[in-house]
Amino acid sequence: MTADPADWPRATYDALTAAKVRHMAYVPDAGHSALIRLFEADEGVVTNVLTTEEEGIAIACGAWLGGMRSVVLMQSSGVGNCINMLSLPVQARMPLLMLVTMRGEWGEFNPWQVPMGRATEAALTAIGVTVRRAETGADVVATVEQAATMAFDGDQQIAVLIGQRLLGKKKW
Amino acid sequence: MDKAPTMDAPTMDRRAAVARLMELCGEALVVTGLGSPSYDVHAAGDRPENYYLWGAMGGAALVGLGLAQAQPERRVMVITGDGEQLMALGALATIAVARPSNLAVIVLDNEHFGETGMQGSHTGRGIDLSAIAAASGFAQASQLRTLAEVDALAASLAAPSPSAGPRLHVLKVHAENLPRSLPPRDAVFVKNRLRAHLGLGTS
């Protein structure tokens, strides 16, 4: 584990690696960029860049069927795309771990991000996904660690929402 | 544009085509798209290597991708319909970029949404899924219209030498609703059966 609390992406990567996550799928977000770089640099991890977020849900389920632990990275605006696909892990009781960077909730300059940001937690909860929020770097790491246990050892479908307050304003 | 370019071209019996694929690719792990493809694969004989989808429309090829990445030594075959694959055209880009050499997507294309009243789909109106797959960079992509062609396809899928990348094959089938052959709807049971077959833990 890193001693630098500002480097929570590195510590999150370490936590996921320790949880034997060897498979990752993502739609890029600036808040995930460091984590994406770490996974893509790891030759022991299979990574998939997606055209839309629900693809990652289906891929993660296929990976689990074949014995690999996967994590899906996306921005809150992509959560709405996933809803019907989430019926698969929920119905099949397959482990699912989603890391969602939030938009539209803290210092947001783009009003178009606000509606889905507001709906993210409710939408995930409505389809049956357990939601945990993290607002600090240390909180992200601890929340991801426990979520990985609940997902992969407890067959739960879990989304960790990473607050926009931690990610900061989008820079132009 | 010709609105029905394939109207008079031959089509094949979907159950016979799937039965040949399943017979000749006996070792394959198979993911099926919701609706008739699930019934067709079940009708060919239930087996633990099958994962049947009853929902999650647009997910079949991508479940196949994840499974192919987790089981790189196994042939993975997705058997789905034109409507199901049309819902996930972007998946063809994602699969092409991922480039799994052990994944084959078989589209049973009747040019209709057969489960919902046989409304015409895009594939009967000029959209060619095999051409989209080829343009996306699939290692092999083709359109088949006869069972003899399916026999040759099945033989190539069963061959031990891997492809250079993913494959997509469109099988033009009759537009008809056959008697349903219903696979288990218990997704947990089917999941555990497949994982147990692969020597993985169940829960």
Image (spheres, coloured by chain):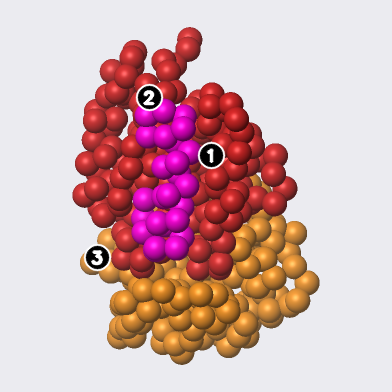
Chain colours: A red, B orange
Cα separation between marks 2 and 1: 17 Å
What amino acid type is highlighted by mark number 3?
A: Thr
Q: Nearer the viewer, residue A136 or B43?
A: A136
* Residue under the image location 41 percent in, 78 percent down: B190
SS state under label 3: helix
Chain letter of the residue carrying label 3: B
Q: Residues within 10 Å of mark 3 (few under 14, many from 20)?
A: few
A11 is within the stretch colored magenta: no
Q: Which-is-in-front pick, marks 2 and 1? A: 1
Instruction: State the residue lying farthest toward the top.
Output: A172
Chain letter of the residue carrying label 2: A
Q: Position of residue A140 (x, y in %)?
A: 44, 36
Which residue in the structure is indicated by mark 3? B116
Cα separation between marks 3 and 1: 45 Å
Q: Which quarter of the picture shows residue B141?
A: bottom right
Which residue in the structure is indicated by mark 2? A164
SS state under label 2: helix
Q: Earlier in the sequence, mark 2 or mark 1?
A: 1
What amino acid type is highlighted by mark number 2?
A: Gln
Q: Nearer the viewer, residue B52 or B188?
A: B188
Circles 2 and 1 on the same subunit: yes
Residue A65 visible in the snapshot = yes
* Residue under the image location 64 percent in, 78 percent down: B154
Q: Which-is-in-front pick, marks 3 and 1? A: 1
What amino acid type is highlighted by mark number 1?
A: Thr
Which residue in the structure is indicated by mark 1? A12
SS state under label 1: helix
Q: Position of residue B13 (x, y in %)?
A: 45, 81
Circles 3 and 1 on the same subunit: no
